[in-house]
Amino acid sequence: MDLFAADDDAMQPIPVEDGELRFLQQLKLPYPNAELMRRLQEDIAWRVETIIVFGKEQAQPRLSAWYGEASYTYSGKTFHPLPFTPLLLEIKAAVEAASGCRFNSVLLNYYRDERDSMGFHSDDEPELGRNPAIASFSLGATRRFILKHKQRPLDLKLDLTDGSLLLMAGALQHYWRHGINKSSRAHGPRINLTFRLVQ
Ligand SMILES: O=C(O)CCC(=O)C(=O)O
Ligand SMILES: [Fe+2]
């Protein structure tokens, strides 16, 4: 066996300071991406979450859902997840095999079109522990994932394509924020799943 042969199933490092990023173009799963996308669109209990901005309730500009085994606080709200579905368990197993990390919960986000977005944040809640590994699986339309360093004028832009897996690890959440801006160009629907290990 050639240990140094190019391995299409291995996550490749993306050079970044103050943290770790790894990327895989296509996560191996027993279903085509389009079928996974359709099943998740239909079967997930999608909700519009609200957040309080300057004392006013505002709908988040996307749909979301939590599944898994542990409740979790995010943007100041505590979520009580639904139990993993068989399909989510299959995806989780594939994500764990590719990343070598273990996860017990997933936040799903559904960007309906180019007007949906995710504000800049770090996934640094105490429940995630120090230097959490977070695996982000994308389906559907390509959207640009932007990372901005908190202390230095550095940014990084990654186009997250259909079927791709991004792993954020090491001190990344400590030093960087990430988000997805609205786009002025038309985009179809996109679903993103971020797998986490909640302590
Ligand atoms: O949709 C994405 O790619 C990012 C999702 C994200 O940052 C999160 O769920 O915390
Ligand atoms: Fe995030």
Image: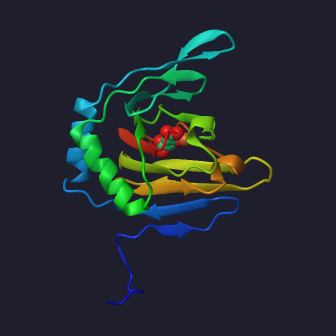
- How far from the left and from the top, in percent, is residue 139? 34, 47
Residue 114, by quadrant, is top left
Question: How many numbered discs, if any?
Answer: 0
Position of the N terminus, as image quadrant, is: bottom left
Residue 76, by quadrant, is top right
Q: Is residue 48 left or right of residue 168?
A: left
In this view, the residue farthest toward the front is 199
Which residue is nearer to you in this view: 64 or 20? 20
Q: Is residue 184 visible?
A: no
Residue 75, by quadrant, is top right
Q: Is residue 16 left or right of residue 8?
A: right
Residue drawn at x 38%, y 62% is 98
Q: Is residue 42 visible?
A: yes
Which residue is nearer to you in this view: 189 or 149? 149
From this view, report whether residue 114 is shown above or below residue 152.
above
Residue drawn at x 35%, y 69% is 9
Which residue is nearer to you in this view: 91 or 177? 91
From this view, report whether residue 117 is shown above or below residue 57.
below
- How far from the left and from the top, in percent, is residue 42? 23, 31
Residue drawn at x 30%, y 35% is 84
Residue drawn at x 62%, y 9% is 56
From this view, report whether residue 92 is shown above or below residue 13.
above
Q: Is residue 104 left or right of residue 179?
A: left
- How far from the left and from the top, in percent, is residue 97? 35, 61
- How far from the left and from the top, in percent, is residue 169? 57, 55
In this view, the residue farthest toward the top is 56
Colour convention: rainbow
